[in-house]
Image (spheres, rainbow, N blue to C red):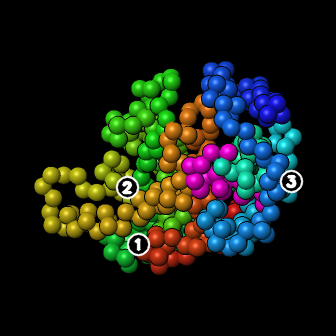
Amino acid sequence: MATCRAEYEQFLLVMLVEDCLEEEGVIMLYDTSILNSPYIPYKHYPKFNLDNLTADECLVRFRFEKDDIFRLADAMQIPEKIVCPNRTVASKIEGLCIMLQRFAYPNSYCEMVSCFGRSVSELCYIFNEMVDITSLRHGHLLQSFDQEWLQPNNLKKYADAVYENGGALENCWGFVDGTVRPICRPTKNQKVAYNRHKKVHAIKFQSVVAANGLIANLFGPVEGKRHDARMLTMSGLLTQLEQHSHAPDGSPLCIYGDPAYPLRVHLQSPYKNNNQTDAQKAFNTSMTRVRVSVEWIFGDIIGHWKFLDFKKDLKLGLSAVGKQYAVAALLRNALTCLYGSTTTNYFYLEAPTIEQYFQT
């Protein structure tokens, strides 16, 4: 028990020194820490070995098939050895599996001890280090349009698929929307985080989803009170679309959003006038039918990574809530590359291979 206490106190001290937590957060964590919980003799459990798990166990615990976990680790270029700030060391497979299992369920670190044979503080360190590594190495994949699968010839292919599946626009390759992610009520700036529409404290993200099922752009987090149109301005998305959203012949391609978004060359939205003609109503209906694909992706992120749907664990100032959601979006893209998604099936498109996606 003394060893457990010393490890946890060292962990909190490092978090304070590195400005990862404010002093109030450290005190709160200490007061509600594992020191008040039953001691788990983690050394009694065997060290983690992926080969000891069955294929079904891997799929349930980590959301990826067993062989694909090795493939994912290589594609993401995870270092062979994960070294944490407190010098805790883990292999790349163990580090990846800790991150995947933590995201997959809203379980506590205590519940993961038996699987990995590590203390709670070690699991926490490794998880945070893996989130940082993934965000640092691959965060640009959710910000930059300068990727092979987003080149003009591919965008035109996505636009053709949307049109062939009932969309009224012939040049629409993707869809934009904002999502509200509930969080634990913050101790400070509660009004800023409060979303009046959903009636929850939250952070918001803006996402662009291509017709092949991949998240092409993710902006956020921003305060829960922000309007979608304001997020659009803050993100600079329109400028990026002006530079990159073109067909091979130079003609403009667009994305489509709900009525909250303005009408631009590269951003289309429904007719908003009250006295709509039959043609305008038909346009709105057809585009609404295909735009629902962006909602499917939001649902897939939370459906596969249920930790992000447990708001009591999402505490501003105590965890990197926004970074965790972005990493979960990258992992959702990885799943799409390997197994497809509802969106890819709907538009009869294929995502790039996982190696092609992460090589950029």
Identify the amino acid type marked 3: Lys
Residue underneath mark 3: 81
Q: Secondary structure at mark 1?
A: helix
Q: Looking at the picture, how far across and down is residue 241, in whole percent?
A: 50, 55
Name the foreground residue: 37 vs 208.
37
Please, what is the dominant secondary structure of the magenta stretch?
helix
Determine the CA span between mark 2 and mark 3.
43 Å
Earlier sequence position, callout 2 versus callout 3:
3
Determine the CA span between mark 3 and mark 1.
43 Å
Q: Are marks 2 and 1 in contact (CB under 8 Å)?
A: no
Label 1 environment density (alpha carbons within 10 Å; few <14, some 14–19, many ≥20): many
In screen coordinates, is 199 left or right of 122? left
Q: Looking at the picture, how far across and down is residue 39, in whole percent?
A: 73, 38
Residue underneath mark 1: 162
Earlier sequence position, callout 2 versus callout 1:
1
Identify the amino acid type marked 2: Gly
Identify the amino acid type marked 1: Val
Residue underneath mark 2: 257
Earlier sequence position, callout 3 versus callout 1:
3
Q: Is residue 340 above or below residue 40?
A: below
Disc number lying in front (2 or 3): 3
Determine the CA span between mark 2 and mark 1.
14 Å
Q: Looking at the picture, how far across and down is residue 357, in whole percent?
A: 66, 66
Magenta part of the chain: 92-110
Disc number lying in front (3 or 1): 3
Residue at 35% across, 41% down: 198
Residue at 78% across, 47% down: 42
> Is residue 136 a member of the stretch shown in magenta?
no
